[in-house]
Amino acid sequence: MSFSLFESVKEVFAGEIMTKLAGLLGESQVNLQKALQGAIPSALTGIILKSESSDVHDFFRIVNEAAKIEIPFNQNSLAWWWDKKAVGTDYKSNIFGEKSTGLSDAIALFAGVSRHSASALLSITVPGALGVLGKYAVDAKLNASGLKIFLNSQKRMVLNELPAGIFLEGILGFENLSGIGDRIFNMDTGRVAEKSASKWVFSAILLLIVLAGIWYFVKKPGPAAAPARILAPVKASLIDTPAKAIVSDPRYSVKLPDGTVIYTEKGSLEDQLFQFFNDPNSKPSRRYPFNFDQMDFNKGTTVISSEGMDQVHNVANILKAYPNSRIIIGGFNSRGGDSIQNKILYENRAFAVASALKASGVNSIQIAGVVSFGSDFARFPAGAHDSLKAKDNRIAISIRSK
C-alpha cells in the first residue's frame, strides 16, 4: 500500500494524545477533534505551498531537520510545543509566517475553540506533519527532487480533506489560493462550454472543495453608523439635437453616513443595499436577493468589465459606510453545458468580485465568505432561450449582519 502523508499525520494524533491535549487546553475533546480536522490538512497545505515557493534545497533541509522530531510525542511535554520559545512556534512561523494568526482564528471559529487553543494545536500539528514527512523522506531515501515529486502526489488527498468551513482567503491570500488551483490542477476555467474528460471531473470537484469556503473572520462590530439621508434627484442636460432639451437623469444622489456621495438608480443594487441598511425593519438572512445588476465579465474569464467595476466601487463605498455589515458573496449559473466547469467559473468570478471589493477598501472582516451554488437555484431549463438563461448567471450578496 502506498504511503499516505495525511493518514500518517492523523495517526500521530490518534488515541490518548487528544485526551491529554483537551485537558491541557481546557477544551472539550469533541471540539478539539474538530479543530484537528482543520489543523492537519491546513498544516499540510501550508507545507505544500512552502515547498513550491521556497528553494528546493532549503526546503529539503527543513524537512531533514524535522526528521529528528520525536514521534510519537512525549505526552508529558506536550505543552512545550506551544511555548513561545519552543521549536513548535518556530516551525509554525516558518511555514505560515504572519498568516499563522489568521489561520488560528479560522480554526478557532470553525471548531468552536479558543484562539489560544487553535494556535497551540497548530504549534504541534505543523512540526508533527513535518516530522512525519521528514522520517518518510529519510526512510525512502528521497533527495530534494524526489521530495517535491512525493508532495505533488499527495496534493489531491490533502485538499480533499480540507474542510469547507476553513476558508483560506486572508490566511494564504486570494493570490496564493487562486495560484494553488492553477499549480495543482492546471485547469482552464475559460472553456465553459467544452466537455471535460473524466480526469478533469475529479480535479474540479477537489478544486471546489478548496474554494467553497463559507467562513471568514467575525470580529467585534465597529461603531454604530450615523443616520443617512437621500438627496433630491438630480437633472442633467443632454444634447442630442441642435436645440437643447432638458431630460431627467434616472440617477439620484445618496449621501452615505461617512459623507461619501454616490449616484445610483431606483431598483439598482446600490439602491437596494442603501434602503436595506437604513430600514430598521430589514433583517439579515441566508438568502441572496442582492444581485450585481451591472456586473459583466470578459467571456470565459474572471476579468470584470469597466461597468462592473463602477458598481464594485459603489458597493465598496456602501459597505465602508456601514462597517458593522457582514456579507457573503454567491456565484450562480444557468443550466446546460459542462455543469462542473460552469460552477467553477462562477465561483472564481465570485472570488474576483470579493477581491475587487477588498482592493476598493472594504475591510476583510466584512466579507464573511464566498460560495458557489452552481445551477441548483436556476429558474430556467437548459433548453431555454439564452436571454432567459442569462438571468440565472449572477453574482449576488447575502447580508448576514447589518
Image: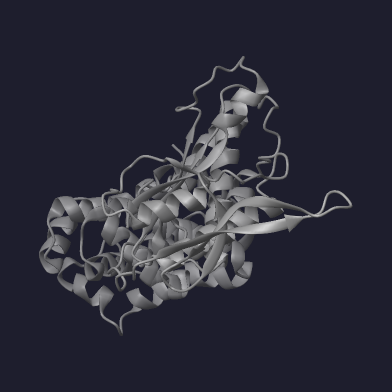
- How far across and how far down the image is residue 227, in percent? 34, 67
Q: In percent of the image, x 36 and y 60: which residue is there?
A: 325
The part of the image, by quadrant, that contains residue 136 is bottom left
Left or right side of 6 for 82: left
Residue 146 appearing in the image: no
Please state, as top left, top right, bottom left or bottom right, where the N terminus lies in the image: top left
- Viewer-proximal residue among 161 and 310: 310
Residue extending farthest to the bottom is 85
User: Split into 4 quadrants, where in the image is the C terminus?
Assistant: bottom left
* Location of residue 383 with respect to 18 vertically, above or below: above
Q: Kindly give the residue lying farthest to the right in the view shown.
A: 242
Residue sitting at x 33%, y 42%: 286
- In the image, farthest residue toward the top: 383
The number of numbered badges drawn on the structure is: 0
Residue 302, percent from left and from top: 65, 47
Looking at the rendering, which quadrant does residue 296 occupy? top right
Q: How is the image coloured?
A: one colour
Residue 131 placement (x, y as % from top left): 39, 63
Q: Residue at x 26, y 49 (%)?
A: 281
Most distant residue in the front direction:
243
Above or below residue 122? Residue 84 is below
Look at the image and tell me whether residue 378 can be seen.
yes
Location of residue 387 in the rendering, given as x and y in whole percent from the top left corner: 65, 25
